Structure formats: structure tokens, C-alpha cells
């Protein structure tokens, strides 16, 4: 399922919460869809005229979050019910990306976010996914509940205006 809501094209004013545009993707949790997700988010953000470096940063962070959902959230189990959701919102010149799964959840988020920590060393996982997300985005929050899944919320300020940490 792909849903794109573009307020300006519908002739509606910008929403009170500053939302200029919004996109939602839902796809099966298979590795082949990781490239689709990062490319879709990169294409969506082009309306803000990002630099190549900004696009690369966003693609890397999205790739890591989607890969985590597939490999860790669903433990690599291929099932038609296993879905990854990507929700993007543009507010002024800020991109918000939420990537979520309804998989196994993360027992200890703090430990999982430590560089080089991995629960899948047998799959040659580097344990750097969250570190890359933190490095390439301006803000990162992880929410998880055992047996309910995980949501990764990332924010990227685009352009040359200073980042102040709060999204209008």
C-alpha cells in the first residue's frame, strides 16, 4: 500500500501542525524491499531540494532502520503477515521518518543502541545500525515493546538554516 497526501496539490492550506506533505508506505518484510524503501523516501524528500549528501544520509538511515525491522524485528522470518511501515512527514524544511514493525520488539533499547552490539553475529551483522542512524540524522528516538514491535523515529533538517532541535 502506498499513500501520498499532498496538501498543496489538493488546494488545501498548509496544516496547522506545519505539515507540508506526508507519505505512508507499507510493504512485506523481505530484504528486497529495503532498496525500495530508501529510494521512495529519497524521492519523496526531493521536493525540499536536498543536497546529494543529505539524500545519501537519509537513504543510509532508512536502509539501516528497514534492515533492522526485517532482520531483528521479524528475525528474518519470511511471512506474508510481516510488514514494515514507513511514514514520512515534511514540516517546513524538516523531514520526519518513522519506520515500524510489529515484530518481537527490543528487550533493552539502550544496549541495542551501543556501537558494535548485535544479536545476530552469525549473520555477520556489524552492530552499527543505530550508530549510523544517529550519525546521519539530526534526531533519533526508538520505541519498542516486547512482542509488539519497534518504531524508529528520525528527524533530518534540510538546507542551510540552523537546526534548533524542535519541529514546528
Image: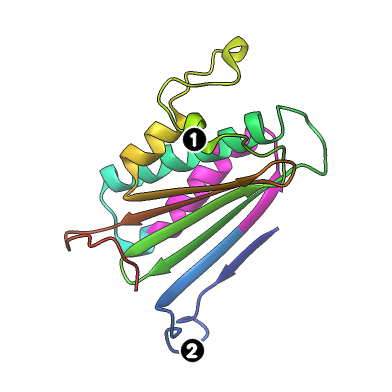
Residue drawn at point x = 44 percent, y = 75 percent: 19
Q: Given the current orientation, which residue lies at the most extreme right position?
A: 80
Please state which of residues 118 and 125 is positioned toward the viewer in this rendering: 118
Q: Is residue 31 visible?
A: no
Q: Considering only vertical position in the picture, is 76 above or below 139? A: above
Q: Is residue 96 left or right of residue 69?
A: left
Number of marks present in the image shown: 2
Residue 140 % position (x, y): 41, 48
Judge whether residue 165 is colored magenta. no
From which residue to which does the magenta span run?
A: 25-45
Q: Is residue 29 left or right of residue 22?
A: right
Is disc 2 placed on a helix, strand or loop?
loop
Please state which of residues 22 and 153 is positioned toward the viewer in this rendering: 153
Q: Is residue 157 left or right of residue 58?
A: left
Residue drawn at point x = 66 percent, y = 36 percent: 73
Q: Given the current orientation, which residue lies at the most extreme top position?
A: 122
Q: Is residue 1 visible?
A: yes
Q: Which residue is mark 1?
A: 64
Q: Considering only vertical position in the picture, is 70 above or below 102? A: above
Residue 118 % position (x, y): 53, 21
Rendered-image quadrant of the C terminus: bottom left
Rendered-image quadrant of the N terminus: bottom right
- Which of labels 2 and 1 is toward the front? 1
Q: Quadrant of residue 72?
A: top right
Is disc 1 placed on a helix, strand or loop?
helix
Q: Which residue is mark 2?
A: 12
Amino acid at each position: 500500500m502506498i499513500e501520498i497526501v499532498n496538501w498543496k496539490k489538493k488546494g488545501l492550506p498548509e496544516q496547522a501542525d506545519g505539515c507540508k506533505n506526508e507519505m505512508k508506505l507499507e510493504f512485506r518484510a523481505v530484504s528486497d524491499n529495503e532498496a525500495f524503501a530508501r529510494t521512495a523516501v529519497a524521492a519523496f524528500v526531493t521536493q525540499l531540494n536536498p543536497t546529494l549528501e543529505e539524500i545519501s544520509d537519509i537513504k543510509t538511515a532508512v536502509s539501516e532502520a528497514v534492515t533492522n525491522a526485517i532482520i531483528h524485528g521479524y528475525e528474518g522470518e519470511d511471512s506474508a503477515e510481516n510488514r514494515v511501515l514507513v511514514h514520512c512527514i515534511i514540516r517546513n524544511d524538516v523531514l520526519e521518518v518513522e519506520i515500524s514493525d510489529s515484530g518481537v520488539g527490543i528487550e533493552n533499547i539502550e544496549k541495542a543502541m551501543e556501537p558494535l552490539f548485535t544479536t545476530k553475529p552469525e549473520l555477520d551483522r556489524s552492530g552499527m545500525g543505530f550508530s549510523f542512524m544517529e550519525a546521519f540524522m539530526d534526531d533519533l528516538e526508538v520505541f519498542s515493546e516486547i512482542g509488539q514491535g519497534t518504531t524508529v523515529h528520525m528527524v533530518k533538517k534540510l538546507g542551510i538554516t540552523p537546526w534548533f532541535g524542535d519541529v514546528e
